[in-house]
Image: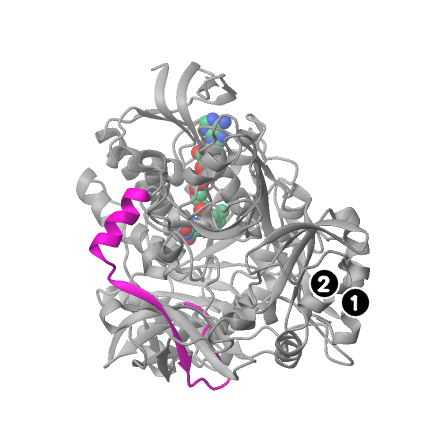
Amino acid sequence: METTTRVAVIGGGVVGCSVLYHLTKLGWSDVMLLERSELTSGSTWHAAGGFHTLNGDTNMAALQGYTIRLYKELEEITGMSCGLHHVGGVTLADNQDRFDMLVAERAKHRFMGLETEIVGPEEIRQIAPVTNTDGIIGALYDPLDGHLDPSGTTHAYAKAARMGGATIETHCMVRETNQRADGTWDVVTDKGTIHAEHIVNAGGLWAREVGAMAGIYFPLHPMEHQYLVTEDVPEIVEIVDGGSEHPHVMDPAGESYLRQEGRGLCIGFYEQPCKPWAVDGTPWSFGHELLPDDFDKIEASIDFAYKRFPALERAGIKSVIHGPFTFAPDGNPLVGPVPGVRNYWSACGVMAGFSQGGGVGLMLAQWMIEGETERDTMAMDVARFGGWVTPGYTRPKVIENYQKRFSVAYPNEELPAARPLRQTPMYETFDAMGAVWGAQFGLEVPNYFAEGDEPRYETPSFRRSNAWEATKREVLAVRNAVGINETHNFGKYRVSGRRARAWLDEIMAGRIPQPGRLSLTPMLSPKGRLIGDFTVSCLSPTEFQLTASYGSQAYHSRWFEQNAMHGVRVDNVSDTLNGFQIAGPKAREVLQACTREDISTMKFMDVRRLTVGMVGCTVQRVSYTGDLGFEIFCHPMDQRSLWNALWEAGQPHGMRPFGMRAMMSLRLDKFFGSWMAEFSPDYTAAETGLDRFISFKKNADFIGRAAAEAERDKGVSRKLCAFEVDADDADVNAYEPIWLNGEVVGFCTSGGYSHFAEKSIAQGFVPVEQAREGLEVEIEILGQMRKARLITEWLFDADGARMRG
Ligand SMILES: Cc1cc2nc3c(=O)[nH]c(=O)nc-3n(C[C@H](O)[C@H](O)[C@H](O)COP(=O)(O)OP(=O)(O)OC[C@H]3O[C@@H](n4cnc5c(N)ncnc54)[C@H](O)[C@@H]3O)c2cc1C
């Protein structure tokens, strides 16, 4: 056995083999896969082998499309069969919400190049004749859906990787992973120790145990899952004898997926009485055995399936496959560099290895070899969870995810499991004031405040929800008087040291401010993609405060660590620095009433240390609401005292608390972009207009400079714009196509209702040559074409006098 390698991939399931293949495909041949038994010895061997593109996250859907298209390439390269059956598939909708969701997915597919279509009950009966369409409104048909041979496909990946120079060691159990001082790894196996520059954890069912060898907790959990294979079914025999195949049918109402298997059928369930497996760890002794049949937990699902697919009731059951596979808390894979651990990469938590394995392998290989991925991977980035994540959180979330696998996913939905987890000192006060809570990166965040007999629950919907009146109240309080909310869901960092400014000049593309001032700056990847959107405040010549997205803390901290500089200290103070934001025309009077300092001289984008009430605070004159506003930061221990001072001073001015729903409406008035909507690694600074904050003049070779300069010289092909939409009861959410003269020319990034301007607003990309005031387009919202006009003038404070004055 070789004793040195550039990469040791641990685990020979479909994911590990895909990672290995993609590493060779992108040019690294000195790579090795270590498998404790034979290849496919985890979840992979008992998978039903189904694949599909449908995924609520657009980037995940695109990667699923990549995975499916890859199989033909694999067959060609290796001469092996993946046992492909591209039979197509329908996903049924039995109610309007489900249908709305499918129509919205179909709309997204238009600019993703996926050829799906909406079909009615009559067409469903023709396409998938075993389906009883009683109560079905329609379905999404995807010609790419199909199934394959899980073992053949995994071996094809393995062969393709070997052809690219990779080595595969089977019966080679990894026992320890020990990091050397230089960041490389000693991988201790039954066959000896291998010195590897990088480790990839593709341990699947045992990913938790493999992670623990390096002291890493991976938030994933195995669930039991069962599917049944029937004896011959006459309706299927007829189709087969006619030289054809029956397509897949996903029936979300029955939480089942069905496909042809030989001359019979195969049906699997995501049942509500589901069971987590191996709660305290996956036994190493578990191998190619199945779990005992458990018909009790799928009894209700089977009864439902008999009604939807009557042929099933007449068919005998040939075999039952019952096995475990792993899920992350949100059901998406855990991929990428593990924060805080050098040269350790994650490729686990992949619950749909045959839909996602190719995309996971490609993204990870790009990340390792090229330093960044070609598209935004936030939905699968292992850094989307923070240090707060524990098995106690993961298990209930994974159960919830399994149970909701086939539920309608609403854009405004807040899922209840494992909450509340993290709360600030304000939780009880805001709760008593009627807060309707959401969760962000484990933290409870008020979405809005219900009053009187308004329900304390926002109805999940694709259309305008019951939060409408409360949101309007809060928006108008900000615009006409003063509003207050916490600064708890900002990611915050303290950067200090004699070289702090030099480091910031390198890591941020924008101008770094002088003491007492703040600036806005994009953070770019080497290829010029947006990886952050920061406010930098200069507290002293050697001390800075950064604020950005709360949910991207682990992602940003990882980038800071990877680009660390001697003589600079970066502390993540997101949870140890809290406070409030006050915004609106009365904000200055409120703050002045709480401090003896004269704040009339405090200009827009100033930062000062102030005593507010009894509390020592850092105060910044800036607000995401686009209004006159202040962000006031303090230690959480002082927060209630600060609250008492501000709230009392606010009462004569009609101060109201406001939540995230109001915040997202307010920012639309000024077309402010939102992180992971307008600003994400899928876009560049020039495309989004953030290039106005890049300092090309500064004397620093900041990361992404060459790419940004090239883009400045060459120009961009698309531009982020704002639109006023003739909407009805549904506003733009994200990724709706933008039509011009009967063609899709762009897509939306986000939208909503401006309660101040009483207009439905969208933001989105259109070709740069079309991006002019007054352009008339149509935006497809829930299948309806809505007229929209491109607008360039802010809806509020058009000259910025209030914000800056
Ligand atoms: C009943 C059932 C039906 C399914 N149907 C589908 C489907 O239709 N479509 C679909 O896409 N997905 C399906 N899945 C899910 C699919 O099986 C998984 O997504 C996929 O197999 C995950 O692959 P993996 O490589 O991540 O993990 P695994 O297959 O679990 O592979 C991990 C590998 O790592 C090895 N390993 C672990 N620890 C060590 C160590 N210390 N040293 C060396 N080697 C080690 C193991 O032996 C194993 O071979 C189904 C799963 C089940 C249970």
* Residue 803 drawn at (x, y percent): 55, 68
Q: Is residue 558 above or below residue 744?
A: above
* Residue 226 drawn at (x, y percent): 52, 52
In which image quadrant can residue 116 be found? bottom left
Q: How busy is the neighbourhood of tag 1: few (under 14 within 10 Å), some, or many (20 plus)?
A: some
**Mark 2 near mark 1, Cβ–Cβ under 8 Å?**
yes
Q: Provide the secondary structure element on which disc 2 rests.
A: helix
Q: Which mark is residue 578?
A: none
Examine the rendering and report whether any part of residue 460 can be seen: yes
> What segment is highlighted magenta in the picture?
705-734
* Residue 441 drawn at (x, y percent): 60, 51
- State which quarter of the image contains the N terminus: top left
Marks 2 and 1, the one that precedes in the sequence: 2
- State which quarter of the image contains the C terminus: bottom right
Give the Cα distance between marks 2 and 1. 8 Å
Is 727 colored magenta in this rendering?
Answer: yes
Is 366 colored magenta in this rendering?
Answer: no
User: Please, what is the three-letter code of the amino acid marked with disc 2?
Assistant: Leu
Q: Say left or right for 771 vs 648.
A: left
Please state which of residues 105 and 465 is positioned toward the viewer in this rendering.
Answer: 465
Please state which of residues 786 and 212 is positioned toward the viewer in this rendering.
Answer: 786
- Count the numbered circles shown: 2
Q: Say left or right for 186 vs 158.
A: right
Q: Is mark 1 within 8 Å of ligand 1?
A: no
Q: Which mark is residue 649?
A: 1
User: Please, what is the three-letter code of the amino acid marked with disc 1?
Assistant: Ala
Q: Provide the secondary structure element on which disc 1 rests.
A: helix
Quadrant location, ligand no. 1 = top left
Q: Which mark is residue 591?
A: 2
